[in-house]
Amino acid sequence: MLTIGLTGGIGSGKSTVAQWFKKRGVPVLDADKTVHHLLQSDSLTISKLIHEFGSEILGENGQINRSILGKRVFCDDDARKRLERIVHPSVAEHMKNERAALRDTGSKFCVWDVPLLFETGLEQFVDEVWVVWVPRDLQILRVLARDKLSRSEVEARMAAQGSLDEKRQRADVVIDNSGSEVETEHQLEKAWKELLMKQRFSN
């Protein structure tokens, strides 16, 4: 089973590309959804986070409030690293288990949609890395237009994810999402055809 690691940055359009794969019937395993699941229902992860950050990260319903936790960690590099040490190993384990289940059903491909693919070292578990790239200025403009964040908050989140230009250098495939949706789809179709061709010759 071939695994594509799909990554990018906030505002780069990675979700649009993930949707493109889903429409073609390629299973997409979403790291953010995995984190959400762990924060909601994994008792070990929840207890570790409360121990690390205190009960103030809990909402009125007694569950971890992602917004409060996010504000704590995005402005504090040390806090972010402590969060990652707790969450990322569980995310990797969970996604590997999901992939194994897909393999058992006969799936030939899957996509790991992971914003922090390189930062967490998860690229070691995938066969190819596809990076969705846009220029930094456009990335900032898109996030400001979409989210209720100040420019400094946007830049803090971008800094937490690492530079898109650096990710681009390490990619097997770069999808330039700075143009129209049609242009992005053309690049995806071309890269997908090349991948299928490679698979055909290697089998």
Image (cartoon, rainbow, N blue to C red):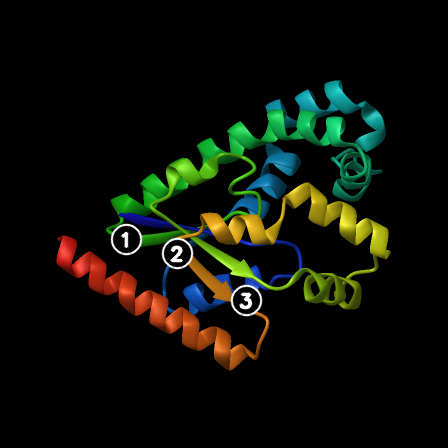
Structural crowding at the residue carrying mark 1, measured as other residues with C-alpha within 10 Å and reported as few (<14), some (14–19) or many (≥20): some
Q: Nearer the viewer, residue 105 or 173?
A: 173
- Percent of width and height locating residue 91: 52, 35
Which residue bears the numbered disc 3?
16
Q: Are marks 3 and 2 in contact (CB under 8 Å)?
A: no
Q: Which comes sooner in the sequence, label 1 or label 3?
A: 3
Q: CA distance from mark 1 to mark 2?
A: 8 Å
Q: Is residue 13 above or below residue 68?
A: below
Which residue bears the numbered disc 2?
27
- Percent of width and height locating residue 73: 76, 35
Q: CA distance from mark 1 to mark 3?
A: 22 Å
Q: Residue at x 56, y 37 (%)?
A: 119
- Percent of width and height locating residue 117: 51, 43
Q: Residue at x 86, y 56 (%)?
A: 150
Q: Residue type at mark 3? A: Thr
Q: Which of the labelled discs sits on residue 188, or is there none?
A: none
Q: Residue type at mark 2? A: Pro
